[in-house]
Amino acid sequence: MDIRQAFAKALRQARKTRGLTQEDFSLVSSRTYLSTLERGLKSPTLDKIQSISEVLGIHPLTLLLLAFGHAEKKGQSAILERMAEEVSTITQIQDPSGNP
C-alpha cells in the first residue's frame, strides 16, 4: 500500500474510532478536503496533520505511526522500536566542538 492510501486508512480509522464526522473538522479543514485525504487523493502538509490531529485529540506522530504501519505492513511496536533506536543514535552524535 502506498503512503497516501495508508494515511487515508489511518485518518479514517482514527476519525471513526473517535466518533467524529468529517464535518467535525470544519474549523481546520473543509469536508471536501478531508474527504480527498481519506480517499488518498491528496497528501497533507505537516501543518494540516497537526491541525487534524488536534481535532482527533491525538499526537501527530500517532497518526503518522498508524499510516506507516499500514504502508509497511508492520506492527506499530516494531516501528516504535526502530524510531527509538534511530533517535538515540542521532541525539548521541556530537557537533565538532564536542558539545552534545
Image (cartoon, rainbow, N blue to C red):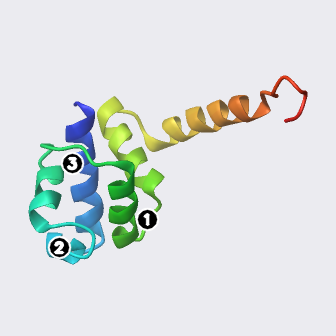
In space, the residues marked 1 and 3 are separated at their CA atoms by 16 Å
In the depicted structure, whether residue 73 falls above or below residue 66: above
Q: How far is the residue under mark 3 from the one under mark 2?
A: 15 Å
Q: Judging from the image, what secondary structure is the residue with disc 2 in?
A: loop
- Crowd around label 3: few <14 · some 14–19 · many ≥20 (10 Å): many
How far from the left and from the top, in percent, is residue 45? 32, 48
Amino acid at circle 3: Ala
Amino acid type of disc 2? Answer: Thr
Residue carrying label 3: 8
Which residue is denoted by mark 2 in the rendering? 21
The answer to which image quadrant residue 76 occupies is top left
Comes first in the chain, label 2 or label 1:
2
Label 3 SS? helix
Q: For numbered disc 1, what is the local secondary structure?
A: loop
Residue at the extreme right? 98
First in sequence: mark 3 vs mark 2: 3
- From the image, which quarter does the C terminus lie in? top right
